[in-house]
């Protein structure tokens, strides 16, 4: 843990010695030294915006920086700490626990007593803090012992406890645009002091475009790939071409953290594609999940739920087919297990849709909770004893199979809910036939 504006992720040589600036990775050397050097995030650093005002006024408040990797969270934290003139303590939520946090707070108290200035505690990957660690940090933020700057790639609404989140502003960083990444690549190639401007390098236009595309808005990824490609090109004494960038980048991992927000975004897209009767999109998102390493059983569970929630009685074959796909994928295993999953996804997307049974469930739940345990109507009660028969249990019950068309005249709900309608079939698919039968049954009971 360092003091001043030194951070634990500063480049270090073996055995603890500092690496010279020229030996630091390109992404570190090109890290912006002022707001003017930052590319992108104009919604935060433009005049009168949140970050710009903090830097201009030299007054820092507790802050959560939320954004994808390589968008400038650590850079902004450094610039904010430097602008206040406060000592900055770096803390990694991945590598440290409550014990280290207590030591950091003790260091902060000592620094404030000595300097009279509130230190800044920069917590990298704050979403990795568990609840007890966040609870341990909360009173020190409340008391003003430290100014907290947290960096996270995950939605803080889900990952940061409400009391701590309520004491912080949240600054959302956006992925850098292709133009932003291109500007950073060009700057690194031209900068003779910190970049590679003094080297005999040429980046071919097609390779530049491919490099930008591979970065997917991540500045660090772009600069790391550029640095590796430059080494390969100089070794081969040739320009940086597409083949060299492909070799430097290797295979880019899909952005899909199974415990993070992107996971839920892709799952949401998959479900909504099936709901929207778009089998092409459904199978695309299905393959996205499987290629990223998602558990096939998780996907199958979502399809089983979907078959009842969004298709229901409009296509009675949907649920058994989804269950069969689950069993088949589990039995076969990957990679062939993708076949029944794709089969089910495309069928469910193309099936007639109705959420009438799902809506009926929630409507019934509301009445159960509103009215409590209403008594069962006497005509629906069993009467296994003479006393129960004398009390009227079962009296007036009509056996449906003995009635014309199977319709009975009495209802089946508690008296307080007589005439209530929860399930309202649609005209979609097979549910249209169900709608007709139920209309006849309700008419026989004298219900509208």
Image: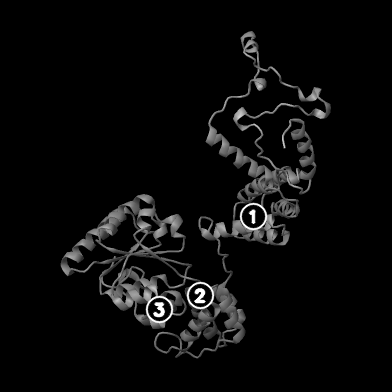
Name the quarter where the N terminus is drawn. bottom left
Task: Identify the disc placed on residue 261.
Answer: none
Q: Is residue 111 left or right of residue 121?
A: left
Q: For the point 28% across and 75% down, which residue is it?
A: 58
Q: Determine whether 239 is above or below 162 in the image.
A: below
Residues tagged 1 and 2 counted as in contact (Cβ below 8 A): no
Q: Nearer the viewer, residue 194 or 139?
A: 139
Pick whichever of labels 2 and 3 is earlier in the sequence: 3
Q: Determine whether 16 is above or below 285 in the image.
A: below
Task: Identify the disc placed on residue 271.
Answer: 1
Q: What secondary structure is found at the residue carrying circle 1?
A: helix
Give the quarter of the image for residue 338: bottom right
* Mark pair 1, 2: CA separation: 28 Å
Q: Determine whether 439 is above or below 20 in the image.
A: above
Where is mark 3, residue-wise?
31
Q: For the point 69% across and 17% down, which residue is it?
A: 395
Q: For the point 27% across and 74% down, which residue is it?
A: 84
Where is mark 2, residue-wise?
176
Q: Give residue 28's position: percent from left, percent from top.
A: 40, 77
């Amino acid at each position: 843990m360092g003091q001043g504006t030194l951070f634990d992720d500063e480049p270090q040589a073996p055995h603890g010695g500092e690496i010279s600036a020229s030996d630091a990775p390109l992404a570190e050397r090109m890290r912006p030294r002022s707001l003017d050097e930052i590319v992108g995030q104009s919604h935060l650093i433009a005049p009168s915006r949140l970050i710009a005002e903090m830097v201009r006024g030299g007054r820092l408040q507790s802050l959560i920086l939320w954004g994808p990797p390589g968008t400038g969270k650590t850079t902004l934290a450094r610039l904010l700490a430097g602008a206040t003139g406060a000592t900055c303590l770096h803390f990694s939520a991945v590598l440290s626990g409550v014990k280290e946090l207590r030591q950091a707070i003790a260091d902060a108290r000592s620094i404030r007593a000595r300097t009279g200035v509130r230190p800044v505690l920069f917590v990298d990957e704050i979403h990795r803090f568990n609840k007890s660690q966040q609870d341990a940090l909360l009173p020190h933020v409340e008391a003003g012992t430290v100014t907290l700057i947290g960096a996270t790639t995950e939605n803080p609404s889900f990952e940061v406890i409400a009391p701590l989140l309520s004491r912080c502003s949240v600054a959302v960083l956006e992925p850098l645009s292709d133009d932003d990444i291109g500007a950073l690549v060009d700057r690194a190639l031209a900068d003779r002091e910190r970049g590679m401007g003094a080297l005999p390098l040429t980046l071919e236009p097609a390779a530049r475009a491919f490099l930008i595309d591979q970065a997917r808005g991540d500045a660090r990824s772009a600069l790391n790939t550029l640095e590796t490609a430059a080494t390969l090109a100089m070794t081969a004494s040739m320009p940086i071409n597409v083949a060299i960038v492909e070799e430097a980048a290797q295979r880019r991992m899909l952005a899909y953290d199974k415990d993070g927000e992107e996971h839920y975004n892709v799952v949401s897209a998959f479900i909504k594609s099936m709901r929207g009767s778009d089998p092409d999109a459904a199978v695309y998102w299905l393959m996205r999940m499987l290629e990223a390493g998602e558990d096939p059983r998780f996907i199958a569970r979502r399809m089983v739920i979907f078959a009842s929630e969004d298709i229901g009685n409009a296509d009675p074959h949907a649920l058994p087919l989804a269950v069969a796909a689950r069993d088949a994928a589990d039995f076969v295993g990957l990679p062939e297990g993708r076949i029944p999953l794709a089969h089910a996804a495309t069928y469910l997307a193309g099936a007639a849709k109705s959420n009438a049974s799902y809506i009926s469930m929630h409507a019934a739940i509301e009445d159960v909770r509103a009215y409590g345990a209403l008594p069962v109507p006497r005509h629906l009660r069993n009467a296994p004893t003479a006393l129960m028969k004398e009390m009227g249990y079962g009296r007036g019950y009509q056996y449906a199979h003995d009635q014309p068309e199977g319709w009975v005249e009495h209802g089946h709900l508690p008296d307080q809910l007589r005439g209530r309608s929860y399930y309202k079939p649609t005209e979609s698919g097979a549910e249209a036939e169900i709608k007709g039968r139920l209309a006849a049954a309700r008419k026989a009971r004298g219900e509208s």
